Amino acid sequence: MTSLSPPKETFLADYRVPDYLIDTVHLHFELGASDTHVRSVLSMRKNHQGLGGDCVLDGEHLELLSVKVDGQQLQGNEYQRTDKSLILSDLPDKFELEIETRIEPDKNTALEGLYHSGSLLCTQCEAEGFRRITYYLDRPDVMAVFTVSIVADKEQWPIMLANGNMEDQGQFDDGRHWTRWHDPHPKPSYLFALVAGDLYRQQDHFTTMSGREVSLQVYVDHENSHKCDHALTSLKQSMLWDEETYGREYDLDVFMIVAVNDFNMGAMENKGLNIFNSSCVLASPETATDADYHRIQGIVGHEYFHNWSGNRVTCRDWFQLSLKEGFTVLRDQQFSAAMNSEAVQRIDDVNQLRTMQFAEDAGPMAHPVRPASFIEISNFYTVTIYEKGAEVVGMIKTIVGDEGFRKGTDLYFDRHDGQAVTTDDFIKAIEDANDIALGQFKLWYSQAGTPELKLRGHYDVINHTYSLHVEQSCPQTPDELDKQAFHIPLAVGLLDEQGLPLLLQLEGEERAYKDFTRVLTLNESSQTFTFINIESEPVPSLLRGFSAPVKLDIPRSNTELEFLMANDSDSFNRWDAGQTLLINTLLALVNNVQLQQPLNIHKGLIEQFSTLLTSRKMDPALVAKMLTLPSENYLAAQMTVADVDAIHAARQFLKNSLARGLKQEFSDVYKQQNSTGKYQFNSDDMAKRSLKNLCLSYLVATDDPMQTQRCLKQMKQSDNMTDTISGLVALANQVGPEGEHALRAFYEQWKDDRLVVDKWLTVQAQSSLPDTLIRIKGLMKHPAFNIKNPNNVRALIGQFCRNNPINFHAKDGSGYQFLVEQIIILNKLNPQVASRMLGAFNSWRQYDASRQELMKKALNDIASQKDLSPDVYEVVTKYLAD
Ligand code: BES
Ligand code: ZN
């Protein structure tokens, strides 16, 4: 490692309460794109709980103009400075600190702090961006009441926003104007926000459960004025849902959402002033897909829900990040399930967890839901903190039941309102409200790794009992070799040979359990559960609804899987049985590809899918999910040594076989589902479109030229982006001139809409055709691409590296080399985005020796760069560690 002085690691165990506190903050901004002047007036006092000592304020990339304590200007020798801090000594118990700094939003390509996006000025402060605006105690346990005044040229920046309510505004004679905002709720600096620009505003309102009127406002570029309705509808749905489900009411007179084009993440929950990536706000039928509509609804909900889970009750330190993120993801998942299909939502959430989080847990960056240390906190906004964190809170809900959970969250919000707390405080509130102990359960917060359950059933014909033996284990992770047994809620049911549910009574119990599903408590490394009064050998349905984030090892025949797929009353498990069947089939095919043996699939599979397709009983969205093949990445994770080429060939073969075997059915269903009328975003229509487009994707796999025509026709007739893009994806993955034509026509039509252009980049980045990398390199020079825009980077580079395994893992290493070049550029421009892109190498040890060699070289090329950002340094070092 040639990095000069390696960045410092921060440990949870070193947490100390702050030595100083801040009661109020007055910020005064004189805005300019190239030059912004910030005056900050802090009323501060010593924290008597602290250890005493100097006052160390965080600050980075700041030009310091002046420091005053109680009105007295300090001389250069009266304070100390480092590149990351301003240190003041010999302070009174209580004092006013006034600091003036100068910053350059124009030069801020990292998009942290105050930066320029298009013609807007906006901020992003989580986690540690506020220190790029002024010197401050930039940590979440320092909470203050903020007043913000902004001065700027009126013509250039007619709209100027900050957190809370606008108190006053006025004009100067020189063409500048000013506004003053006040947020009465004490908050940490990471929730501070400011926006200035020429924006269109769409308004609505919401009456809260106690009868208060809240003004709802969405701010977007003028050209997007027709794309605000869906975000506003989603916001109103969120506000009502949180009142009904968690009893949580909004607490300011105004709630604002601003869309910006350059944003590192999806969206940010700044108090009263959420800032969103424009891709997570803007929607119109012609430009946004069902998936976009769905995502926008979920993310608007997510950021809104943070108002309680995150803002009113915030995190003590960044190790507690999952306290707000895990819980809020669970809340947004519940919300989306309530607004759409619960079954489909669960399938999507679990699928994402298994493909992304299980891979993280099995790789070099594995960390617990509450990490013990980090170098760069931005690297810990991970699927583990988010998705596994949500599963952990979801398991608590399963354990205490819906009512108990609500009692627990009520107590949590009441007890800790206005405080900065820990995941232990959250657990304590649930324990106290339910009078239970969750001590062992807390291991889910401190132990990394995905537990594995080995399950073996045994039917006793003589005694009519069915016993289920369970052994749990957890693989080692880089941080920890020895794992203790987890407390795992295992939801199970038993089916008789007709597929009907059996009554569940455990040995020693007086009567059968009331429900057909019951939650077994696993808390030892080996346990046996014996069900009595079971008249004939049952088929077990295990881990219903995916009741815990674990892997299952249970031998199942294809017949058993087909039986569950057709009969289980738990829709998640029906889907899961189907997926297991497909995975088994695909892994057998992979094996045959590797041995160069002829490929074939058993007839039963085609019959199963035919029944599924033609049954009118099931929700079309579920049928579509069941017919979707597991991704190449997920299959790779199921192999000891991932074989990209064999996986691709096997998956292609299965897809083609199903397509040919069920051509008539796919065609019939396509026609049947094809008449949804004018586009509407609702579950029913969305379900129909998803099944129809799934059929289309199979139909084009038959290589029948008629199907190419069908794609073209669909694109031509479509009034919505869901159908348009499905046609385009199908064509772009085919050899032949139609794909080229379609791509060209699509770009011509949409070149002025940056979000649609991102889709166009993605379609090409994901193409499995062999010339894809060459095409991508060309696209990087195209006017549609700007490496400084994170959405462009994710759409092109990110999609290629993460969702195009056959090309990214090209044998000659060209895909890896390409990514290295991009990471080196991005490391300087935008370290957060660079580090995210590096994530494509997470599973590098999963591949064959020659690919491993190439990836190792790629990682070393990055590691040997001078001036590595802490973000990239941390990830690359952990990837290369033995
Ligand atoms: N607080 C985060 C946004 C954030 C993350 C800001 C990291 C700075 C650094 C926000 O609440 C969030 O979690 N956003 C998610 C979307 C959400 C639906 C999971 C995002 O941006 O991806
Ligand atoms: Zn969040």
Image: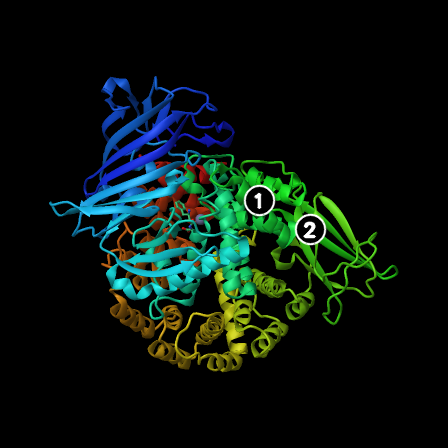
Q: Which residue is mark 1?
A: 411
> In the rendered image, which quarter is residue 741 located in?
bottom left
Tell whether circle 2 marks a residue whose Cβ is less than 8 angstroms from ligand 1: no
439 left or right of 613 in image: right
Nearest the camera: 806 or 115? 115
342 left or right of 378 in image: right
* Disc 1 element: helix
From where the camera sits, is residue 471 visible?
A: yes
Q: Which residue is mark 2?
A: 454
Q: CA distance from mark 1 to mark 2?
A: 37 Å
Q: Give the percent coordinates (x, y) of residue 36.
A: 21, 39
> In the rendered image, which quarter is residue 828 located in?
top left
In the rendered image, the vertical position of residue 671 relative to residue 878, given as above or below: below
Q: Give the percent coordinates (x, y) of residue 117.
A: 26, 50
> Which image quarter holds the N terminus?
top left
Q: Give the percent coordinates (x, y) of residue 211.
A: 45, 57
Seen as rendered, the residue at the extreme left is 174
Q: Are marks 1 and 2 in contact (CB under 8 Å)?
A: no
- Give residue 612's mark: none
In the rendered image, the vertical position of residue 570 relative to residue 116, given as above or below: below
Mark 1 residue type? Leu
* Disc 2 element: strand
Nearest the camera: 603 or 378? 378
